[in-house]
Each structure stands twice: as structure tokens, then as C-alpha cells.
Amino acid sequence: MTASQPTRRHLLAAGAAVGASALLPRQAPAQGGAKKFQGVTLNVSTFSAAYPKLLQQWLPEFEAATGARVNYDAPSFPVYNQRADLELSTRGAAYDVVNVTFIYSSRWINSGWLTPLDDYIRNPNLTAADFDIDDFLAGARAPETGRDGKLYGVPWTAEALLTASSRFDLVQQAGLQFPDTTDDLVKVLRAVNKKERVAGFVADNHYGWTFVPYLHAFGGDVFRKAPDDLFPTLDTPEAVAAADYYANLLKEFGPDGAITYQPDQVTQALKQGRVNFTDSGQLHLAQLGDPATSKTVKTVKFGLVPKGPAGRFPGTAVHGLGIPAGSKNKEAAWAFIQWALSKQTTRRAVAAGYGSPARRSDIDSRVFRDKQVINGSDLAQLALDSIESASRTGHMKYRTVAVYPQVDQQLNKAIALIASGQANAKQAMQQAQAQSIAELKRAGLSL
Amino acid sequence: MASLIAAPAGGWQAERRRAFAFGLAPALAVLLVITLLPAAALLVGSLTPLSLTDPAGTFRFDDPLVNYRHLLGDERFLGSIGTQLQLSVASVALQLGVGLGLALLLDGRSAVLRATRTVFLIPMVLPPIVVALIWKIIYTPDVSPVHRALEAAGWPVRSLIANPDTALWAIAFADTWQWFPFTLLMVLAALQTLPADPVEAASLDGANRWQLFRYIVFPHIRPVLVVCGLFRLIDSFKAFPLIYVLTDGGPGNVTEVTNYYGFIQAFNFSYWGYGSAIAMVILAGVFLLSWGIGKLGWNTHEHPDR
């Protein structure tokens, strides 16, 4: 009985909605056609982050201008990805605008689950003249582009993985500099670990993201040569050395339960000054500069990820907004993306403190550069350097291959296995290698 | 003569059976549609290399047992079965023990006991994800009131969910917290129906409290305990929210149960064929286990006084 009531109510509501939507298109022209998308309901989903939160605040303006109603949904990163991955794979019409997540970009784009945007961008009736797609960093557009050369997402963030020290004062007290190399980092951590009850190092337990700059720095890689040769290379001596090094940072200098830390926990721990060092995305790190919530705003310092024997390889990530292939409101969806990433909106976001825009005009603006200097560190410059270095070396190509999510998970497991003392680096990485090969074969790759 | 009487009687009974069958048909049809058809789809899916990223290769039956063959060589899968059994046995045993103990303590007619019983039911009615979040807070040393209290008292405890030796127990403990009220409720109900006479007679004969429990109370509630155990055992194979929120199957693989591994294959990697094969194995396992427990003869004790 109780179960049947909501069902009936839903049915009635759905019926009413169908009825209403049948009526509305005929009413719209009667209102003078000013509101192009009167009666359209757009379902927009991204993961929760600074930019989507700003958009959410400004939504009423888009709705007022276009007449469309927007259902806006922004769950946490892993939840969003799982939901969107499933929904896109069924070619469903549940979403009209989605975030094209970096590690899923190739998989979603090249499986044909998204709509190419080129025709919308080229059409002057659908796209304002000042939208200027070329203003978005070329390095940010590249991962949103399919094998067919078409653009499938408009980037809203191009962020870099940076190193941060929330209590740099402790490092200075020990008479040391900001660590530039992997050896320096260990030296610094030995000196400051547990000083004033501050643990030395922690990282988001998504090690397939936070560990990889170290894997590269030691001369290792994820695949032999992504995207052409996808044979995993997780058990090379370099990879084993890198895993050993990184897991040891967590084991020796991590807070209690270090391997359970998720990104928000890491940010909180640094804001509260419970942990000193991390390597984390710039979007998260920018929050350390917020005087209202961060206790470490006066002592924080940022730098590039450390250089290893093979060089410096900062991680970068790009997220964009795209339209699912199954969407029934593509024109309205494009109008939304155009509004969300217009020069006006992105400029306004930067003025409101947004930390990782993808438009060159924003990145070069005075307003942005001034805001990005947190306690003397220029986050924007560090990020630009990272993104430029990534487009020079191409070391981030591993990340956008369709099978990366499978290998990503093996890396998460391997580092946790070593850090929790269940396996040594060699065993853990050999296991990750064997299981990655099995997963890739299951995906139909001939290795 | 006899046949003359028997024929209409049989006809009447057959008629009745037909009427029953006719009345049951809609319910059976619904049951068929909502349970058997998805199960059949699962079975069919498990015989294909169905992967959502490769729609072209979706329904191929050229090598129907490929997924099952892979399973036999998949160490992570085989390991997950052991983890599953450990978690199931530990959490069901704890739930039965705690539920039974508390039920015996709370069996009575005072208003205080009634209020206490209600309080104990709260964990069971909370949404599983909320339970998981509560335990995430308790198990995170940074924010946990328990960890802080222990540290203040001079017994600092390291994170339980980051330690491979304790992570599975931490999950079993949280699961027990959520589900012992089920056993509590069932056993309390059984205790309410316990006839007063044999208890009184036994105590007049000089039986002590333990003997009363062992020979009168326990045989009375044993069938209920078996049902509770079976229910919880079957349900324990579906363990998900606690693992998802607390450990994500880690550290390493120590809390990765079969159900969770199936989820990862199907929903993180999109190998639906392989995920379906894992689900079929779980289904078969649960079926065999339930059948085995039924065969043990536990539930022939409906009339212990006979």
C-alpha cells in the first residue's frame, strides 16, 4: 500500500509533465519567441567542484534568459563518474549536459557516447560570435578531441598536480628549502615529520593520479608507449623503485590511516595543519588560500611536483562539458554549455576566485594572476608551467586511453598493498602488472 | 457406488485446484517477470563477452564459457570468495550472539525495557549508506570521538580500516551493529510465545537458570535462530555500502568480497558479461548454502517436546 502510493503519484506527475510539455511548444511562439527554450527541462550533471558550484549559483540567470528549466546535479567525483559512465554507456536520455571526465574522455568520446560539437560551434545561429573556441588552451582541448578530430567537450578546467606544504614554517625552521627533487622531499620530511604533531605527508588514495608523477620521475611509465602500444610497464625496475619510494612516504611520514584519505580529507588535513606535505590537484590546493576556512593560509607554500632521476613530470587534468549522444535537447544543451563557458561567465568566475580556468584570456588576466598568489606562491604560474610541460613531453597521454580506468585501479591497489605492509614493492607491482594484462585482454586488446 | 461418489468429489477437488491456480496465476506471472526473467538475462549475459565499450561484440556466443574459464584463473576473484566467507561467518555469528544475548536481557514487560528495545532497533532502520557514514567517522582517527577518547585515556588505537589485519573485522563489527536488531527482534518475538508452564515446572523441579535456558528456552527459539542466521547469511553476500564507503575493498584486497568485485568488473570496467558470470556464481553459492543448511536438519525441531 505504502509502496503503491508514490508510484501512483509519480505516474500522475509524469502524466502531467507529458501533458504540459505537449502544450508548451505551442505556447512559446505566442510569447513572442523571446525565450527560445521555454518548457525545455535540461538535466545537467557534473561532479562537485568550485566551477560547477559557481554555475549553480548563477543558474537562475540562464533560466530567465532562455526559459529552460535546469535540473542540476553535482555528486562527488567517484559517484559522478560511475553514474555518468553507466548512463552514457546505455545511450540514455537522462542527461543533457555532462562533465567529460579526464580519465574517461577517450572511452566516452571514442565509444560514440557523446555528441560532436563542431557543427554547433560553427553555426552562427547557435553560437555567439565572441565565444571563440580557440581561446581555450590547446592543451586543454586536446583530450576533449576524438580520434575523428572533432571536439566533444568544452574545457572548464585545466588543472595541474602540484606539491604543497601547509606548514612551510617548520621546513624553514629546520633550515631547509622547498623540496625540488625526490631526494630533497625525503630529506625535508625526515626533518619535519611529527614536528608540532604535524604528520609529514599524505595524498589522495587515488594513487593512479597522485603517484604517477613519481612513477615518471623515476623513469617508469604506465604503458610502453601510449596511446599506440598499451602494453603495461608496471613491473619495470624503475616502476618498482618509484612505488617503493612513494608507498614509503605514506608509511613513514603519513598520518594514521593515511591510505584511506580521499581528496577532501587531504584538503581538510592540510587546511587544519594536521599534515604538512601533499601532492594534489590545484583546485583542491587553492582552497588552502581561503582565510575563512584555512588555518594554514599564512604558512602554506606551493611548488611543482619533485624532479626525479628521469626529470619532472607534473600531472595535469582537463574536464569539459559535453552533450551525451542520447540527449533529446541538444540545442538547449549547447546553449547551456555556451552560457556556462562564455567569456562573460568564465571572467566572472575568475573574479569570484575560481582557480583553474581553461581560457587563455582568463589565465593572462591581471585579476586572475593577482588572486593566484597565495602567501607568495604563484599557483597560476606553477599550473601553466605544468600544463606546458605536459604538452611538450606528452607524458599525460597514458591517462586518456580507454582502458586506463582498469590500470588506474591496479595502481591504487599496489600502493595501498605496499604502504600497508602486505607486499613489498616488487610483489605488488608484479601483481598489478599481471592483473592489468588480464584486464586489458578482457577488454579485447591483443598485447 | 464408491466410484460414483469419488468421481464428483475428485472433480470438485480438481475444480478447486484449478480455481486456486487461476487465482494464483497473476501473482506467478508477476513473479516470473520480476525475478526469473532478470535472472535468465543474467545467465545469458554471463555467456557473452558483453562489454559496454564494445557494443559490436555484445551478443556473441561463440565461446559461451569464456567468462567462467577466466574466473577459475582469476586470483582476485578466488581471493574474494575467501574474504566473503570470512566476513559472512564472522558477522552472522556476531549478530546471532549479540542479538540473542540482548534479547534474553531485554525480555520483560516493564516500560523501561520496552523503551530500551525500541532504541536498539534504530540501527536496523537507518539507510545503509547512513550507517556506513557513521562508521566512517568512527573509524577515521582524525575526527573520530572514539579514537580521541581512547587516546585521551592513554590507549591510542591506530586506524582500524587502514590496517590489513583489522579492516575486515571493522566491517564485520559495523555490519553487526546494523543488523543484530533483526535477531533481537525475532528472538524477542519467540520468547513472548514461550509457554510459562514448562518453565515453571522446571524451576519447581530445581533447574537453575542455565539449565532453564539450555533445555527449555533454547530449544524453543532454535528454529527462529536458524531462520535469522539463514536470512542474515544470504543478506551478508550482498554486503556493499559499508565496504564501498569504508574501505573500497582495501587495503589492497582484504575487504574485497565477491559481490564488490563483481560490482567493480561491471560498473567500473564495464565488463558486464564477466560481472554477470560473477553474479551467477554468487547465486549458485547462496542457493547451495541455503539448501545445505536446510538439509542439516536444523529445522526439524518445530516440536521439541515430542
Image: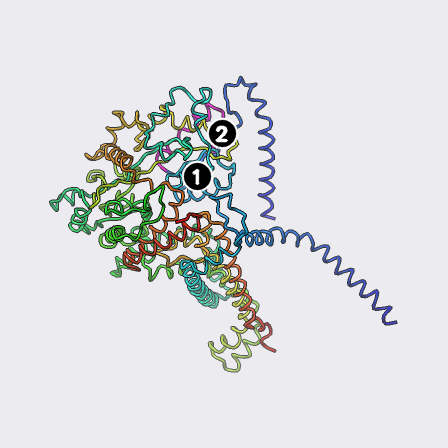
Residue found at the far right of this picture? B1
Of all chains, the one bearing label 2 is A
Residue A291 shows in this picture: no
Q: Amino acid at mark 2?
A: Lys
What chain does badge 1 belong to?
A: A
Q: Which residue is mark 2?
A: A330
In this image, B121 relative to B1: left or right?
Answer: left
Say which element carries label 2: helix
> Looking at numbered disc 1 in the image, what kind of residue is underneath it?
Trp
- Taking depth in this image into account, of A366 and A142 the one nearest to the observer is A142
Mark 2 vs mark 1, foreground winner is 1
Residue matched to label 1: A108
Q: Residues within 10 Å of mark 2 (few under 14, many from 20)?
A: some
A227 and B78: which one is in front?
A227
* Residue A58 in which image quadrant: top left
Query: Residue at the spot x=53%, y=17% of the render?
Result: A32
**Looking at the picture, how far across and down is residue A171, in whole percent?**
15, 45
Residue B113, numbered circle? none
Is residue A144 placed above or below B207 in the rendered structure?
above
Q: Is residue B40 visible?
A: yes
